[in-house]
Image: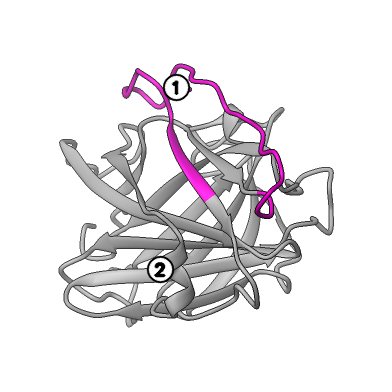
Amino acid sequence: MKSLAIKICTCLVTVLLALPLGSQAAMWGGGGGGGGGGGGGGRDSVTAVRVAGPVAVAPDDPVWNSATATNVTLMFTDSVEGSNGGSGGSVSVKAIHNGTDIAFLLTWNDATQDNLIEGPENFTDAAAIMHNANRICRMGSQSNPVNIWYWRAVDDTVQNLLSGGLGTITHTLGDDNIVASSSYSGSQWQVVLSRPLAAVDGNDQVSFTPGNSYPVAFATWNGANR
């Protein structure tokens, strides 16, 4: 069976949760990219804008007009069999929160909609957000696992995982509190992943606090590249 090439960010991304209007927000300073076999320079930054109302919404909901998109560069990892190297494209990231829940909108180009698995040679399109990102972009280690929200187009659901390194999932966490919504149109995926700010299991999952910033990373899989 062939392996599926993964595209992952070349440096870490900082997510800043904006405070309500009139509050003093925390400032994030620059810094070098954290591993990942390239990149360099400073990190990209995504601001999770404070909004009113629910954030577990569809990708085309008008609430996303409140957030500014950050374009995150991706690369093919050199550790996955079948990766053909070169540029991995990019993913556009928006984030919002309402003081209770946080949501991310990922948008990326994909010429084929691979959301059916009919045999062992078929792979699904997918995307992931990786938290505890000061431990990645190589998807953690056995001693320092990372928390991954892993979305698959084949069932439009999210798996809440711990990874102890590339190709190693240590165990699956409860994922009932992570909600997904997706759409595919015009050779482009749009996927929303949302979760309460407070983690159910704080030992292995990040809890978000408005005014603070958090390192994360993003990845996409193209089911047609196998």
- Residue located at (32% from left, 24% from top): 39
Q: Position of residue 34 (x, y in %)?
A: 48, 22
Answer few, some or many: residues within 10 Å of disc 1's Cα (few below 14, many 20 plus, some between 14 and 19). some
Which of the two discs, 2 and 1, labels the residue nearer the N terminus?
A: 1
Label 2 element class: helix
Does residue 53 appear to the left or right of 1 in the view shown? right
Nearest the eye: 143 or 81:
143
Q: Quadrant of residue 157?
A: bottom right
Q: Which residues are magenta?
A: 19-47
User: Of tags 2 and 1, which is closer to the observer?
Assistant: 2
Does residue 208 appear to the left or right of 180 in the view shown? right
Whether label 2 touches label 1, CB < 8 Å: no
Nearest the eye: 83 or 131:
131
Residue type at mark 2 is Asn
Whether residue 29 is visible, yes or no, is yes
Q: Position of residue 85 (x, y in %)?
A: 19, 36
The mark found on residue 65 in the picture is 2
Reading the image, the residue beneath label 1 is: 35
Does residue 43 appear to the left or right of 176 in the view shown? left
- Residue located at (31% from left, 70% from top): 189
- Residue located at (35% from left, 18% from top): 41
Magenta span has 20?
yes
Q: Position of residue 100 (x, y in %)?
A: 76, 65
Residue type at mark 1 is Gly
Label 1 element class: loop
Magenta span: helix, strand or loop, mainly? Answer: loop
Whether residue 3 is visible, yes or no, is no
- Decide: is 123 above or below 1: below
Answer few, some or many: residues within 10 Å of disc 2's Cα (few below 14, many 20 plus, some between 14 and 19). few
